[in-house]
Image: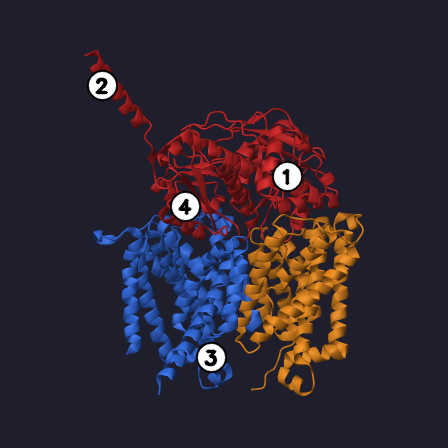
Chain colours: A orange, B blue, C red
């Protein structure tokens, strides 16, 4: 039982990682109805910037907030310069653009920051907690993810700005007609996603250690988490993240062994999606013909 | 008439190529043919039928491994492995198309992405190791030209692949031009109207998945024969993404797009490496971006626009 | 009469002499240059090993500045294969058929080198000093043109197995391994080393993929098996995470770590060196971050080389030591060829290396080869980390 509990905790910890990146994916989706495949690389790139600032001697929180701001600006800039031009392009062309972004950021990061692995400090204390099953950092990271989730939920549900963003994603033309500054909303959406991604990266790096491939493996799981929970739902994404993390661990340990856990976990996701095509917490959209 | 002339000219050029180019370039040209077949498959599914697939690398791998295993473990001649790969691809594709019916857009993208990611792990699985060669992969023998023809191995494989590709492209063209093609496109453009008109959407979609996978598998089988080696590392999720990029850049919903796309994915990375040794993929990404910004409908779309512009200028 | 005979004899001697001094070239060699080719993963998941290629290139740059080899400059052509075997095939065919290189050198990766194994042996191109530890590169009978550089993984694993059998015969062993030919080759050798006792001693095995974000789950699983010995056949990132998780969970097994991940600067320091105290591995070269070499002349020379020719490089990586050493060995082989730069002679010299002590290798680890045995490094030094440096654990172990 002890071992099972340990795997459960471990799964929640990794699930937290997936959940935080999934939030960034959901943010972009809610504001633009696109899935940004480059989200992981943007988060990794921002974390490297934080690492450089820390190396230059900045105190942790100064570097943290500076990075969040830089990531916000980077995200908004990418939208304004690149994504906006493709507003009327076919969906797949946009997907390819995201792939291009992914490749560019990955390559640039390798060139600028090198390929060696670095450690990244954690703002949370070092002691061992819960028998060493969950470090204080992992608990703290989960806490930060939940905090971001709460903020996002409140933002979209109750704030006028959130409403405008939702309207923009839903129907840009009508929104423009009622006075919503559509371009500004889109840039804001991307900027916020960039910021969330940066926070996710800085929470993840102390656990998985920072290098160019830090987010490459995480992207699929974050994507799975977001879709499993319902791509438009932030609480769904977080729940999806924890579910995927725990599932992956338990399957890998007890059912199929680590060598097949990827395949089996994904089969399960497909099964869930077939049973509930719009995700666990997603709303089925009824389209009037 | 003009188009026919162009086609004949291209065909003639293609036949002369292997006698003019050095051996390894003929090898590269044969790889382009294999990729073109794979992209045609993806194009059928994503371009003509509107079902996105981020995991077509899995079918490419399937075809490659079927060919490799039959050649290496069961001693089949290389040409016989192609129909086997096609069959395997068709069946697996159709089976995957069944649950895919319930998925749409982003959700289908995830399901296929998952397939692409899981492929290397499946190929490495210990349980299949006796057949697949595990992580070490399988090394294949190189086919020689039959009947004592005065062609070296590379040239023969090129002509063989070219013949297969032309046959398959012609088949696809006929399929798309006929009523089947209309149904496929109708389901993409307006699924509900198509259903209302009596088209069996489910059947069309699953069959298209099967045929698409079949084409990609044949491409994979050819690539295995040409490279003479298969290993799980060759078929990572990056391959699936590369195929999608190739299909989009080449031009979706167009047969010539498959060829443009294949040329792109084969040669542009090398081009990028020559431009910048330090960050070649950044250059590749930049080229991709530029292409998408200028020609969102892909190179085939761009070529079509050029054609229209040209025709307009010709008219008085 | 005497003069005529003498004159004839002199003429004959001269003729023979010039025939012996006649230069012989295969494609890639000439009076002014020697072309060497390779493909390397400069991009993709194994891009960190691209650093090896860059340092090899830097070594040849230095060599050229010093006059080259026997008056000839090295033209080093290194292409990117993104660790994808089809690209390796393409690149190597281009190097051999278009660029006309004399030989292939220092290529990285098992799958990638396997893809061209048959081709280079069929085309009789020397395929030397490969940076992969698979056992198939020591096969002079069937594949005489391919020669590895690293000691192979199964041999290293057998050293650990033997040590455990001798020092901890009742141990309960847990194994963590990377799920690819690297990790699996190690595991196979390890089990062979334990022999009949393998089933009884290994209580738990867990694998991980290179793309897995963490190995925490695997470590938790291995800990739960009650093992008191952990053997890690992993690469740098997983090793760092393992050390940290071991510390966090308070599990203190005797930890054997594969050599490729046993680096002070690249692995122990990011995890926290105190977490790596007691880690056992094997070594044949000097760890670039081990302070015991600070005043060593050879080490200083290497450091100066890196600072001058690769100032932007991260010195913590083991790659630079391997690259420097293998490039130096390659140079020695080429020098021994003299003016006879045929592929056959290059291979002959490569298979006739006599007890070379490479500067960055541990004192006592000599490199040698023979036409029947292509294994260059024939012994390993077991070492243990004490928090600051590697200390020797007993004598050199011959690899079998």
Circles 4, 1 touching at the beta carbon (< 8 Å): no
Task: Give me the C-alpha separation between circle 2 and circle 4.
Answer: 53 Å
**Residues at marks 4 and 1, CA–CA distance in whole angstroms:** 30 Å
Of C188 and A222, the residue lying toward us: A222
* Mark 4 surroundings within 10 Å by alpha-carbon count, few (fewer than 14), some (14 through 19), many (20 or more): many
Q: Is residue C211 above or below residue A159?
A: above
Q: Is residue B9 left or right of residue C299?
A: left
Instruction: Find the residue positioned furthest to the top.
Output: C2
Cα separation, mark 1 vs mark 2, equals 66 Å
The residue mark sitting in front, 1 or 2, is 2
Chain ID of residue with mark 2 = C
User: Disc 3 sits on a residue from what chain?
Assistant: B
Residue B74, image x, y percentages = 35, 50
- Residue ID for mark 1: C263
Secondary structure category for the residue under label 1 = loop
The answer to whether residue A99 is seen in the rendering is yes
- Front one among A261 and B135: B135
| Circles 2 and 3 on the same subunit | no
Q: CA distance from mark 2 to mark 3?
A: 95 Å
Q: Position of residue C215 (x, y in %)?
A: 65, 49
**Residue that numbered label 4 is attached to:** C116
Question: How dense is the environment of label 2, judged by Cα within 10 Å: few (below 14), some, or many (20 and up)?
Answer: few
Q: Quadrant of residue A12?
A: bottom right
Circles 3 and 1, Cβ within 8 Å, touching? The answer is no
Which residue is rendered at x = 26% and y = 19% of the image?
C10
Q: Are marks 4 and 3 in contact (CB under 8 Å)?
A: no
Disc nearer the start of the sequence (2/4): 2
Dots 4 and 3 on the same chain: no
Q: Which mark is residue C8?
A: 2
The structure residue drawn at horizontal position 32% and vertical position 56%, both measured from the top left corner, is B21
Q: Which mark is residue B187?
A: 3
């Amino acid at each position: 039982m002890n071992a099972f509990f340990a795997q459960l905790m471990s799964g929640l910890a990794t699930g937290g990682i997936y959940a935080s990146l999934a939030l960034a994916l959901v943010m972009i989706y809610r504001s633009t109805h696109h899935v940004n495949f480059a989200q992981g690389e943007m988060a990794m790139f921002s974390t490297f910037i934080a690492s450089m600032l820390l190396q230059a001697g900045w105190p942790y929180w100064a570097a943290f907030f500076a990075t969040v701001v830089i990531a916000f600006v980077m995200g908004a800039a990418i939208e304004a310069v690149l994504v906006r031009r493709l507003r009327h392009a076919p969906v797949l062309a946009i997907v390819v653009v995201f792939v291009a972004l992914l490749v560019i950021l990955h390559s640039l990061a390798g060139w600028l920051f090198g390929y060696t692995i670095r450690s990244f400090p954690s703002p949370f204390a070092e002691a061992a907690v819960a028998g060493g099953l969950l470090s204080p950092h992992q608990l703290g990271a989960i806490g930060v993810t939940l905090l971001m989730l709460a903020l996002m939920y409140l933002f979209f549900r109750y704030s006028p700005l959130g409403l405008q963003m939702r309207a923009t994603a839903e129907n840009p033309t009508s929104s423009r007609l009622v006075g919503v500054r559509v371009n500004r909303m889109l840039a804001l959406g991307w900027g916020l996603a960039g910021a969330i991604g940066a926070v996710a990266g800085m929470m993840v790096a102390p656990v998985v250690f920072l290098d160019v491939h830090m987010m490459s493996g995480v992207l699929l799981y974050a994507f799975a988490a977001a879709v499993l929970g319902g791509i438009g739902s932030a609480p769904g994404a977080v729940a999806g993240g924890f579910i995927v993390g725990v599932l992956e661990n338990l399957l890998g340990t007890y059912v199929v062994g680590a060598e097949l856990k990827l395949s089996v976990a994904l089969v399960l996701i497909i099964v869930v999606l077939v049973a509930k095509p719009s995700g666990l917490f997603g709303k089925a959209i009824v389209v009037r013909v | 008439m003009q188009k026919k002339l162009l086609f004949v000219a291209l065909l003639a050029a293609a036949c002369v190529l292997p006698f003019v180019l050095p051996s390894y370039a003929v090898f590269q040209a044969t790889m382009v043919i294999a990729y073109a077949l794979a992209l045609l498959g993806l194009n059928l599914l994503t371009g003509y039928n509107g079902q996105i697939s981020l995991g077509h690398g899995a079918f490419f791998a399937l075809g490659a491994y079927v060919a490799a295993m039959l050649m290496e473990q069961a001693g089949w001649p290389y040409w016989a492995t192609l129909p086997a790969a096609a069959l395997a691809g068709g069946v697996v594709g159709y089976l995957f198309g069944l649950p895919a019916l319930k998925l749409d857009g982003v959700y289908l993208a995830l399901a296929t992405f998952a397939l692409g990611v899981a492929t290397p792990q499946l190929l490495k699985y210990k349980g299949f190791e006796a057949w697949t060669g595990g992580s070490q992969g399988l090394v294949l023998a190189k086919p020689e030209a039959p009947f004592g023809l005065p062609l070296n191995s590379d040239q023969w494989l090129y002509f063989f692949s070219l013949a297969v590709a032309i046959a398959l492209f012609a088949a696809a063209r006929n399929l798309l031009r006929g009523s089947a093609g209309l149904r496929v496109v109708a389901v993409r453009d307006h699924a509900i109207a198509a259903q209302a008109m009596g088209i069996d959407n489910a059947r069309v979609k699953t069959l298209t998945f099967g045929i698409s996978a079949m084409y990609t598998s044949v491409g994979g089988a050819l690539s295995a024969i040409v490279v003479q080696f298969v290993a799980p590392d060759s078929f990572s999720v990056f391959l699936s993404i590369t195929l999608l990029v190739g299909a989009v850049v080449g031009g979706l919903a167009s047969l010539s797009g498959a060829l443009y796309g294949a040329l792109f994915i084969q040669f542009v990375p090398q081009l990028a490496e020559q431009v910048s040794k330090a960050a070649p993929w950044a250059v590749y990404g930049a080229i991709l971006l530029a292409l998408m910004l200028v020609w969102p409908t892909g190179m085939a779309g761009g070529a079509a626009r050029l054609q229209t512009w040209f025709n307009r200028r010709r008219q008085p | 009469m005497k003069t005529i005979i003498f004159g004839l004899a002199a003429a004959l001697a001269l003729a023979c002499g010039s025939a012996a001094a006649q230069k012989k070239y295969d494609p890639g060699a000439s009076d002014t240059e020697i072309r060497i080719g390779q493909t390397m993963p400069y991009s993709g998941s194994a891009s960190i090993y691209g650093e090896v290629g860059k340092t090899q290139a830097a070594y040849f740059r230095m060599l050229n500045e010093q006059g080259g080899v026997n008056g000839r400059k090295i033209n080093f052509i290194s292409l990117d294969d993104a660790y994808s075997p089809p690209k390796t095939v393409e690149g190597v065919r281009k190097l051999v058929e278009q660029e006309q290189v004399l030989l292939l050198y220092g290529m990285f990766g098992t799958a990638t080198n396997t893809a061209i194994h048959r081709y280079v042996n069929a085309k009789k191109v020397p395929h030397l000093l490969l940076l992969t530890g698979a056992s198939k590169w020591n096969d002079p009978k069937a594949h005489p043109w391919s020669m590895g550089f690293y000691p192979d993984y199964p041999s290293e694993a057998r050293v650990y197995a033997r040590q455990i059998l001798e020092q901890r015969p009742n141990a309960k062993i847990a194994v963590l391994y990377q799920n690819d030919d690297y990790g699996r080759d190690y595991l196979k050798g390890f089990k062979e080393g334990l022999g009949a006792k393998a089933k009884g001693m290994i209580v738990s095995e867990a694998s991980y993929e290179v793309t897995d974000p963490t190995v925490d789950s695997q470590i938790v699983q291995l800990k739960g098996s009650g093992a008191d010995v952990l053997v890690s056949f992993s690469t740098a990132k997983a090793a760092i995470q393992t050390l940290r998780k071991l510390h966090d969970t308070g599990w203190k097994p005797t930890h054997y770590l594969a050599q490729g991940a046993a680096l002070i600067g690249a692995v122990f320091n990011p995890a926290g060196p105190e977490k790596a105290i007691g880690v056992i591995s094997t070594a044949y070269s000097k760890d670039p971050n081990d302070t015991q070499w600070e005043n060593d002349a050879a080490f200083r020379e290497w450091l100066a080389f890196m600072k001058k020719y690769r100032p932007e490089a991260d010195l913590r990586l083991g790659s630079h030591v391997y690259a420097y050493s293998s490039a130096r060995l390659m140079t020695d082989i080429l020098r021994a060829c003299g003016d006879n730069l045929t592929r056959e002679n290059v291979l002959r010299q490569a298979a006739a290396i006599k007890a070379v002590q490479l500067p960055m290798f541990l004192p006592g680890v000599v490199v040698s080869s023979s036409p029947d045995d292509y294994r260059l490094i024939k012994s390993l030094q077991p070492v243990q980390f004490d928090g600051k440096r590697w200390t020797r654990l007993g004598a050199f172990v011959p690899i079998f």
